[in-house]
Amino acid sequence: MSYTEEVEARLRADSAEIIGRYPSGHSRSALLPMLHLVQSQDGYVSPDGIALIADILGITRAEVSAVATFYTQYKRHPTGDYLVGVCTNSLCAVMGGDAIWEAVSAHVGVGSDETNESGRITLERIECNAACDYAPVVMVNWEFFDNQTPESAIALVDDLEAGRPARPTRGAQEVPTFKENERTLAGFLDGHENEGPSAGEPSLLGLRIAAEKGWSEPLALDDTKGGEQE
């Protein structure tokens, strides 16, 4: 491993804190947040990070790599300061996601899973951002920018490239860098967890209508009565 002594000591200390969140004898459960921890240091799941995790958890590098290659949030090559994900799944595509992707990709000059020359922007074409009620959606380091247009998305990446603050529609008041957000995903709070709304009117509309009309969820089935509702 080529980490400096200082960096390795810090990663090992942080890893010990992560492992301590799990029951004794289940240290392997810490693998996912530890992968985020490595990304907070290296900007991707590096060979050095894989080796360190394997050593700490007492598993093979192949076992670490098998998990890292399964989940798309774990990157296998360096990621820019801002990972810009454009949703082009069904609803977002119909609402303009494809047009946004084409405009942003042409403007930045890179394709999916590629980083621009400055190292500031990595683009990613995403299958679903899980925010269909705000389609079309763009995410930056997993923070939501709702109801986007080609013009607004281009303005967003220009702000990120220039180092100007970008405020998500929901969530933290300002988009963190990729490495900063990865440390949060590793389970270390950054002080911004209570900023901004987590759900907006489109997400809550169904709940509000149900309350106004007195609707409630169906009662649970009682298997002892042949499937009849109580």
Image: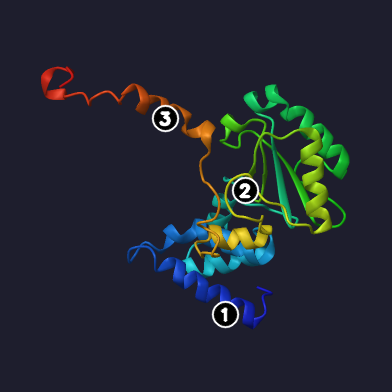
**Sooner in the amino-acid sequence: mark 3 or mark 1:** 1
Q: Report the mark closest to the observer, 3 or 1.
A: 3
Q: Position of residue 100 (x, y in %)?
A: 77, 33
Q: Which mark is residue 9?
A: 1
Q: Which residue is under mark 3?
A: 208
Three-letter code for the amino acid on which mark 3 is drawn: Arg
Q: Is residue 97 left or right of residue 170?
A: right
Secondary structure under the numbered disc 1 in the rendered image: helix
**Sooner in the amino-acid sequence: mark 2 or mark 3:** 2
Secondary structure under the numbered disc 2 in the rendered image: strand
Label 3 to label 1: alpha-carbon separation: 51 Å
- Taking the image as drawn, is residue 130 in sight? yes
Q: Which residue is under mark 2?
A: 143
Q: Quadrant of residue 214?
A: top left
Q: How many marks?
A: 3
Residue at x 34%, y 65% (from the top left corner): 25
Binning the other alpha carbons within 10 Å of mark 2 as few (below 14), some (14 to 19) or many (20 upward) gives many
**153 to 184, vertically: above or below:** above
Label 2 to label 3: alpha-carbon separation: 25 Å
Q: Quadrant of residue 21?
A: bottom left
The single residue placed furthest to the bottom in the displayed view is 5
Secondary structure under the numbered disc 3 in the rendered image: helix
Q: Position of residue 124 (x, y in %)?
A: 72, 42
Three-letter code for the amino acid on which mark 1 is drawn: Ala
**Sooner in the amino-acid sequence: mark 1 or mark 2:** 1
Q: Is residue 38 left or right of residue 24?
A: right
